[in-house]
Amino acid sequence: MVSSLGARGTNAYTWVEQTVYVNDIPTNELERWMQLESERFKELVLRLFHTELEAVYEEFNINQDRDFRKVSAAVNETLFPTHPYGTQTTIGKGEHLKNPSHVKIQQYFNTYYKPNNMAIVLAGDFDPQAAIAYAEKYFGTYQPAAIPPFKYEPQPELTQVVRKDVMGRRPLRAVGVKGGGANLADNDYLTMIYRLLFNGRAGLIDLDLLQKQQVLEARASVTPMEDYSVFQLYGKPRDGQTLEEVEQMLLAELDKIKKGQFDEWLIKACIKDLKLSEIRANESNSARAGQMTNAFILGTKWEDYVARFARLEKLTKADIMRFANKHFRDNYVVVYKRNGADPNVPKVEKPAITAVAVNREKSSSFTEKFLSQESPRLQPVFCSSNLASTSR
């Protein structure tokens, strides 16, 4: 049915606070797409459950060999000891996969797949009023329900540097610092500091470490989440370097932010670079849809998201220094990914699964009716030109 729409990129993904379903469809198929999705999310059908579970087993096992995931998990479990950010990963643990429950999955669907907990995010060439009418027509019968509030205890601040070792294929070092949630002022400061350190051109890490080839690789990043954010520094050593040496070089660059050892023009340049990146990204429907999705998931008002550049432009050098000195102390976790085999990788053996005979020759009555519908034809838009010819 999805293929009949001419859809591309049909997929779904999960992350810390979201499950997102993706389709790239032609403009003239918007109504049929709404009709199909309203049917899909109206009722949970656990068809081919165990064959899909086998794919999740494989994904879980592959992730155990990804060094970056090991490092991120070690950072998060230290910063968030009693919060799901640190106590579990998106894919879960091996014991979760060994005991899947149809009943609990159905309960989860019945609890959270409600219209007041979902969003239809559209970006592209379509009539907004028509889209609203289609949404009302096909999703208007969905009934809202109370969503259980998520409660958590405030996570304790680190009072000293915590160091951890994990084993992997290539050496890597990460420094993680906990920040406030995506909708707090903290996130603006963290974004500004990470761009001052690393922007691919003129950040302090770019100029002092990468362009001078002091390390094999280095960068800074911010991961904004609803309850907290994580600021991280990463570095890979050159031959003969230790991870401890890389750590000191990265912290020295962060220390320059605290001491104000950067030029004023760099603040404005970083903001302009962010704007340029967004302008270029917004030529893509998927990027625009992604921005709206993130705003919805994080509970960010769209007007606040749009105004973030204006907020960044108000930050002064003194403001940034003050924030850095207050929040970047001995309150971080350092993870050294040492080179070597990891004896603690929790691989999960896939169970024997009986093959399911799938009869693809038959269709349900809904499918037959759906496929028989005719969609309006796309109407071309012609460009006209009044350019006068010139001769030399």
Image (cartoon, rainbow, N blue to C red):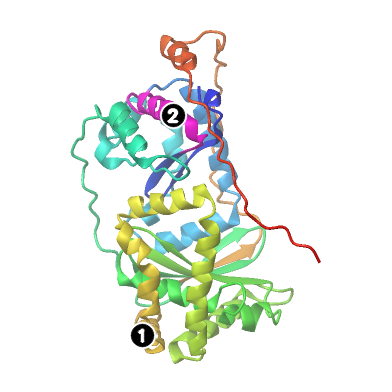
Q: Say the numbered circle drawn on residue 319.
A: 1
Q: Say the numbered circle drawn on residue 33.
A: 2
Can residue 182 be spotted in the picture? no
Query: In the figure, 52 relative to 221: above or below?
Result: above
Would you identify the image quadrant in which residue 339 lies? Answer: bottom right
Label 2: which secondary element: helix
Q: Amino acid at mark 2?
A: Trp
Q: Residue at x 42, y 65 (%)?
A: 230
| Residue interval drawn in magenta | 22-44
Q: Amino acid at mark 1?
A: Asp
63 vs 368, left or right, is: right
Can residue 199 be spotted in the picture? yes
Task: Examine the structure image and report whether residue 36 is included in the region drawn in magenta.
Answer: yes
Q: Say the numbered circle drawn on residue 194.
A: none
Q: Earlier in the sequence, mark 1 or mark 2?
A: 2
Circles 1, 2 touching at the beta carbon (< 8 Å) = no
Q: Position of residue 54 (x, y in %)?
A: 54, 30
Residue in the foreground of this view, choosing between 317 and 249: 317
